[in-house]
Image (cartoon, coloured by chain):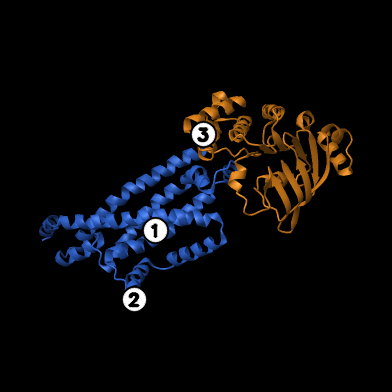
Chain colours: A blue, B orange
Amino acid sequence: MMLFYFQRLIEIYPFFLKGLWMTVAVSGISLVFGTIFGLVLGILRASGNKFFVAIIGVYVAVIRGTPFVVQIFIVFFILPEWGIQLDAFPAAIISLTILATAFICEIVAGGIKAVPNGQWEAAASSGLNIFQQLRYVIVPQSLQTILPPLVGQYVLLIKDSSVVSVIGVVELTRVGWVTVNRIPEGLMVFSLVGVLYFAISYPLIRLSNRLEKKMATQQVML
Amino acid sequence: MIKFKGVNKWFGKLHVLRDIDLHVSPGEVVVVCGPSGSGKSTLIRCINRLEKFQKGELFVDGTPLHDHSTNLTKLRAEIGFVFQQFHLYPHMTALQNVALAPINVRKMKRADAEALAHEKLARVGLADKADAHPTQLSGGQQQRVAIARGLAMSPKIMLFDEPTSALDPEMIGEVLDVMVKLASEGMTMCVVTHEMGFARQVAHRVIFMDEGSLVETGKPHDFFANPQTDRAAQFISKILTH
């Protein structure tokens, strides 16, 4: 029987590939947006401007202090209240982006604050404007601190993307649920799901470790 | 060139600058000295508005710094600042450190800016260190790169905040030599330093500060030989006997 199910599973592998692709798409798009917004909010948070620091602080606290599944439901169900019909896919992207932005902004703010104040002063003294100070002097130096945890955060967010299955996005986890109804070998099905997640995450974990080592040696050089 | 009129500054309750009145003419070299905590660093950091002040007027090259609408970026491009701790950009070579502002602020072509940077590095005696990163340079060499970085913007004023205080004794000379040369070429300079040899040799005026006030000002020879106030006399006897 087990062999039979295994063969069935092999037969429907395109379904899994679709799920895998959907997971990559949902998390990939959200991570791109989350990184861009996280960078901007992280810089504002590190700027010390009281207004931005307070607002962003509240945002980060709310997102970190509530379960992701609840956030998804709120995004998915609140917009129709205002007359905006949202498909599961964009709702998933929006909620994952909101989540990613909160965590990435914390990482970025930490990296920016780790750059000594003298670097800001030197860059400002030479006549660079605030954007040039950030682009040429501050951000390149903070990347050392930012990159390893950032890639680590990507891994966490890719795994968190499994939660968007609750609103019906047919990504890897959802594919597992659907399949298990037809092939009642839960262990086999979800092992395959797990292996596919691992196939995406593991290269990133390796990358994060390598960055950490590389940055550590650079730090010694500085 | 630089004109302080009744400038006051507080850090919270601490009154760090008290009624500062000071004029610095073009081409003048002014040495600011005084015990630590006397406000001398704060004073020169006001000149390019690294520090804000709460009361009084300050004009630099005709630009009012007490006016909040002043374009600080534009002003700072005309003033070189040399820090005690150098603050070179650690992720760039010496050449890139010097060329960065000319490329981005003066909008020079990269090749021109690099030629300029080579010229300025040669001027501070570091022609052969263009491709070195700051970590590969000694303290004295780093400080000279920092001076070259300031000079690359062809500033009207150069400010030095204890430029030799973080250096090993054997490296102080090489930095002072560069500064002496600069002074002899007619650069307007304000230098916070305890290097009294430098003050004697090139300063047109020595300013003595204590507890946020400008206590005494005079020609170096008069100031050292014949201080007018007890506090200045005490200070001079302390630094000269060491």
Between residue B237 and residue A212, name the one nearer to us: B237
**Residue A147 placement (x, y as % from top left):** 43, 47
Residue at the (31%, 71%) spot, across then down: A84
Looking at the rendered structure, the secondary structure element under dot 2 is helix
* Residue on which the image places disc 1: A100
Q: Residues within 10 Å of mark 2 (few under 14, many from 20)?
A: few
**Residue A115 placement (x, y as % from top left):** 54, 46
In the image, residue A91 sits, relative to residue B207, either above or below, namely below
Looking at the rendered structure, the secondary structure element under dot 3 is helix
Task: Give amino acid for label 3.
Answer: Gln
Furthest residue in direction front, as rendered? B62
In the image, residue B207 sits, relative to residue A61, either above or below, namely above
**Residue A220 placement (x, y as % from top left):** 51, 38
Sequence-first disc among 1 and 2: 2
**Is there any visible trace of residue A163 in the rendered image?**
no
Q: Quadrant of the C terminus of chain B?
A: top right
* Residue on which the image places disc 2: A81
Q: Residues within 10 Å of mark 1 (few under 14, many from 20)?
A: many
Chain under disc 3: B
